[in-house]
Amino acid sequence: MNWTLSYVRSSERDLSKLPAEIQPGIFQQLGNLSLGPHNVRSEKMKGRVNRYRIRVGSYRIVFAVDKKQKHIEVEFIGTRQEAERIYGGH
């Protein structure tokens, strides 16, 4: 069974607002992520169940993993500062 990847609506908006110079790196990481969470260098978020983050320069991709369903949901794409404000730090 392959992994499925979906996006929270707000993360789709986040993606469309990214600066052009960071977009290729974000898209590359999302492509790797679609192959499964083991295909990216991610860190588990402290105090969050099944939440991980990927660092792309000063930007972060935050996602949730459901290992039983083999599903990944991208929740947030934005700057580190925005991620810390929303998710409360690392």
Image (cartoon, helix red, strand yellow):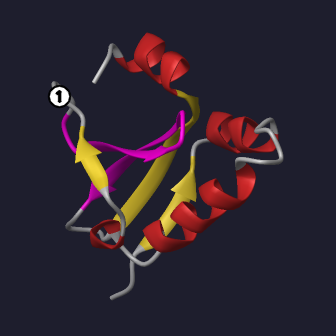
Residue 46 lies within the magenta run: no
Q: Quadrant of residue 33?
A: bottom left
Residue in the image at 80% along x and 39% along y = 19
Q: How many marks?
A: 1
Q: Position of residue 36 (x, y in %)?
A: 36, 73
Q: Quadrant of residue 87?
A: top left
Residue in the image at 62% along x and 58% along y = 25
Residue lying furthest bottom in this view?
Answer: 1
Q: Quadrant of the C terminus?
A: top left
In this view, the residue in front, 81 or 49, is: 81
Q: Quadrant of residue 71?
A: bottom left
Residue 22 horizontal side relative to residue 77, left or right: right
Vertical comparison of 86 with 77: above or below: above
In this view, the residue in front, 6 or 61, is: 61
Segment tinted magenta in the rendering = 49-66
Residue 36 horizontal side relative to residue 75, left or right: left
Label 1 sits on what residue type?
Answer: Lys
Q: Position of residue 37 (x, y in %)?
A: 32, 65
Residue 63 lies within the magenta run: yes
Q: Which residue is mark 1?
A: 46
